[in-house]
Amino acid sequence: MAQLSDDCFAFGGSLLGIDAARHMIFERVQPVDGVERVALGRALGRTLAEDIAAPIAVPGFDNSAVDGYAVRFDDLDPHGPTTLRCVDRIAAGHDPSAALTRGRAARIFTGAALPVGADVAIMQEDCQRDGDLVTIRPGIKRHANTRQAGEDVRRGALALKAGRRLGPADVGLLAALGFAEVPVRRRLSVALLSTGDEVREPGQPLAPRQIYDANRFILSGLLERLGVEVRDLGIVPDDPATLAAALRQAAESTDLIISSGGVSTGEEDHVRAAIANHGSLYFWRLAIKPGRPVAMGQIGATPLAGLPGNPVAALLTFALVARPMIEALSGTEPHVAKRFPAIADFAYKKKTGRREYVRVSLQSGAGLPKLARYPKEGAGMLTSLTETDGLAELSEETTRLEAGAEIAFIPYSELI
Ligand code: AMP
Ligand code: MG
C-alpha cells in the first residue's frame, strides 16, 4: 500500500505554514490503486474514477416547459391577438400525431415533445379557448416556454470529471444520462485511534481524573461523511511499545492512520516519537491556532495524521490536514472551504506568523453578517463547537482586529 514517496524529509525547525503543509500533502500522498463499478444507487459519496461523457443529449428532444399550446412563431400576429385551430393533444411521453401545419395549434403538456414545426409554447393562462379555437395574446418570443434538445447536456459533452465526489445531484445527472453503474475509486480504509492513559470509552465507569473519549466520535463522524471505511482501533495507552505495535499493525492493513493525542512535546506524548522511530515524520508543528501540534508522516508506507488531543484542535486539524490526505489518497478533487465576508463584533489581538481560527456565531441583521466570538476560548471546550456556527479566519500577517472590521467567515458546513 505504498502511498507516500520514500524520500524522507523531516521538517525540523520552526513552525510550518498551513499552505506549505497542504502543498506537501498533495505532493507526497498518491492515490491508491483500484477502481470498481458500482450500481448508481450505491454511488453517493464515492469518487468518480473516470471522466464521464454524455452518451445522450439531455433533454433528448425539443419539448414544452409549460401546460398550454404549441404553435408556430411565424403564425403569431405581433400586434394583436391570433386565433388558431387546435388539432392535436400531446401528453408527456406520447408522440405528436403529426407535424404542426400553418395556422394550427396543438394542446400540449409539460415535458411533452413539441411537434415538428412548432417553436414556441404558450402557457394556458395566456390563452383563451373556445371550442376548437384558441386565441393567443401578442408579445411572445420565439422559443418561449420550450426546452431545446441538448440544452442541459449536449451529447458527447464532459458531464462530470474524474475525481468528483458524487453528491445527490451528480448521481441524478448520471441517472438522467442513463448510467446504471459508474466507475469509482476503491473505498479507503482508515484506522482511527485515540491515545491517552486518561481516556475511557463512553459507557465504562469513569475513575477520578479520567475523561471520556470524545475525539474518536467526532473523527469517525467526519470520516463517515467522507465515505471512507473506518477501522476503529479504540483507545491506546500512553505506552511507546503498545502504541508502536498498534500503529505498525494498522499500517499493514489500512490506507491511512488517524490518531488523536500524544503529539505535543511532553514526555507522555509518544505518537511523534513512534512515527520518527518506525517510519518518517514530515511535519509535527503547524503555524496555526488552535491545533499547533499536529503530525504528518508515514509508518511503513502508510500515511499517518497525528492530530492533537484537544477536541477543537482535533476537529480543525482534521479539516486542514487529514481531509486533504484522504482526498490525495482517494484521487478526489481537493475541497476548498469557501470563505464569506462578515463583520467582526469583537476585537482581537494575535501574534504574526500563525493563522488563527476563532469560534464564532452569526448574528442576524442588515448588511454583512456580524460574528460574535464565543466567550470561552479553550481548545478542549466542546460546547464552543456545538454552540457556534463556524470559524473566523485571521491571516498570518494580522496582529490586531478591531471590532467592526471585515473578516473571513468559514461555516462549519464548508469546513468539515
Ligand atoms: P494530548 O494532545 O494528548 O496532550 O491531549 C491534550 C488534551 O486533550 C488533554 O487534556 C487530553 O486529556 C485531551 N484529550 C486527549 N485525547 C482526547 C480524547 N480522545 N477525547 C477528549 N479529550 C482528549
Ligand atoms: Mg495525551
Image (cartoon, rainbow, N blue to C red):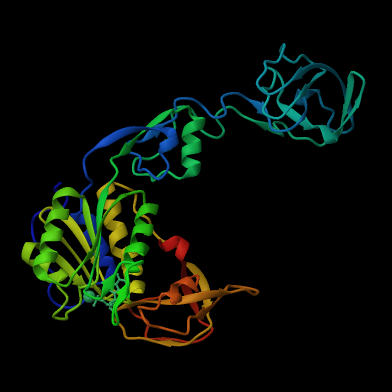
In the foreground, 233 or 57 = 233
The mark total stands at 0
In this view, the residue farthest toward the front is 205
Q: Is residue 99 left or right of residue 25?
A: right
Estimate the x, y position of residue 84 in percent, counting from the top left.
Answer: 86, 21
Quadrant hosting residue 6: bottom left
Q: Is residue 356 above or below residue 258?
A: below
Is residue 158 visible in the rendered structure shown here?
Answer: no
In this view, the residue farthest toward the top is 98
Is residue 209 visible in the rendered structure shown here?
Answer: yes
In this view, the residue farthest toward the left is 277
State the quadrant of the C terminus: bottom left
Q: Is residue 262 above or below residue 98?
A: below
Estimate the x, y position of residue 256 in percent, counting from the top left.
Answer: 22, 54
Say which residue appears at 20% left-offset and 73% top-offset.
262
In the foreground, 178 or 52 = 178
Q: Is residue 314 above or below residue 377?
A: above
Estimate the x, y position of residue 157 in percent, counting from the top left.
Answer: 44, 32
Quadrant hosting residue 357: bottom left
Q: Is residue 395 above or below residue 87?
A: below
Estimate the x, y position of residue 164 in percent, counting from the top left.
Answer: 38, 44
In the foreground, 299 or 3 = 299
Say which residue appears at 32% left-offset and 86% top-offset.
351
The quarter of the picture showing ligand 2: bottom left
